[in-house]
Image: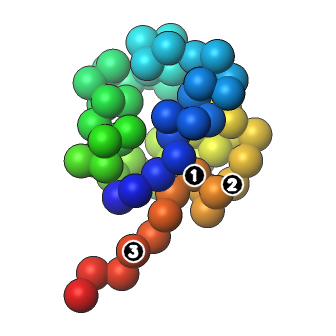
Amino acid sequence: MKNHIVQYRKKFGFSQDALAKKLGVSRQTIISIEKGKYSPSLPLAFELAITFETTIENLFIYEKES
């Protein structure tokens, strides 16, 4: 799933490692989410939105599968 995590992470001054620690996940999870190779669980998506003071809709780009 495409997203804007990298932009928000940099805007808020988090390294991948720092964001992972804040959210209680691995750095590899953050890398996979940023690359669009992993879609986070709904609770993790909410935690990301809360961390970046935005909405899930602003973080993630929903693309309907064809």
Distance Cα–Cα, label 3 vs label 2: 17 Å
Q: Amino acid at mark 2?
A: Thr
Q: Are marks 1 and 2 in contact (CB under 8 Å)?
A: yes
Q: Which mark is residue 25?
A: none
State the residue lying farthest toward the bottom. 66
Mark 3 burial class by Cα count in 10 Å: few <14, some 14-19, many 20+: few
Between tags 3 and 2, which lies in front? 3
List x then y, in percent, for residue 51: 66, 32
Please identify, in this view, whether the residue under mark 1 or under mark 2 is nearer the observer: 1
Based on the displayed image, in which of its 4 quarters is residue 9 positioned?
A: top right
Residue 59 - label: 1
Task: Classify the position of the N terminus by image quarter.
Answer: bottom left
What residue appears at the point 36 percent right and 81 percent down from the top-left corner?
64
Q: Earlier in the sequence, mark 3 or mark 2?
A: 2
Task: Give the residue at mark 3.
Answer: 63
Q: Which residue is mark 2?
A: 55
Q: Quadrant of the C terminus?
A: bottom left
Q: Is residue 11 left or right of residue 32?
A: right
**From this viewpoint, is residue 13 visible?**
yes
Q: Secondary structure at mark 2?
A: loop
Q: Residue 53 vs residue 10: left or right?
A: right
| Residue 25 vertical placement versus 56 (above, below) | above
Residue 34 x/y as whole percent: 38, 39
Task: Please provide percent x and percent y for residue 5.
Answer: 51, 40
Front position in the image: 16 or 50: 16
